[in-house]
Image (cartoon, rainbow, N blue to C red):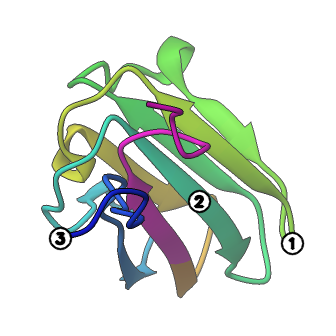
Amino acid sequence: MEDGDYINLNQCRSGNIVLTNSLSVLSSFTGSEVYISNKTGQSVEIYDNNYSAAGNAFLLDDNDTITIRGITNTNQVSAKTTAGTGTLYFRSQYYSFNPSR
C-alpha cells in the first residue's frame, strides 16, 4: 500500500425482513448503528436492546427512516407492524460518516 491510499474502515451490510404484528429481531450484522427504512405500508414499532415493553416502542410511520445508534449488532434491534405484514429495510454501519485519520 502506498502513502495516501484510501482505506474504508466503515464496513456496512444491507438486509430486509418481512414483519408481522409479532416482534421480530433484525438479522445479525455487526455495527454501531443501523439505518432503518419502513416500506411496510403501515406504521412499525421499533425496539432496542431487549426493551420490548409497549412503553419502549419507537413508532416509525410508513415511508419514514430512522438511525438507531449505540448498538454493537443489528440483532439488538427488533420490530413489528401495527397490523398485517410488510417489508422493513435496514443497513448496518459502524458510523454515519468516514472518520478522518
User: Which residue is at 33% across, 62% downward?
Assistant: 7
Q: Nearer the viewer, mark 1 or mark 2?
A: 2
Q: Which residue is mark 3?
A: 1
Q: Which residue is mark 1?
A: 63
* Percent x, y of residue 21: 45, 65
Residue 29 left/right relative to 8:
left
Q: Secondary structure at mark 3?
A: loop
**Gap in Å between the C-alphas at discs 1 and 3?**
43 Å
Q: Which residue is mark 2?
A: 36
Q: Specify the amino acid type for callout 2.
A: Ile
**Gap in Å between the C-alphas at discs 1 and 2?**
10 Å
Q: Which residues are magenta?
A: 89-101
Q: Are marks 1 and 3 in contact (CB under 8 Å)?
A: no
With respect to residue 46, does 49 lie above or below? above
* Percent x, y of residue 101: 43, 30
Badge 3 or badge 2: first in the primary sequence: 3
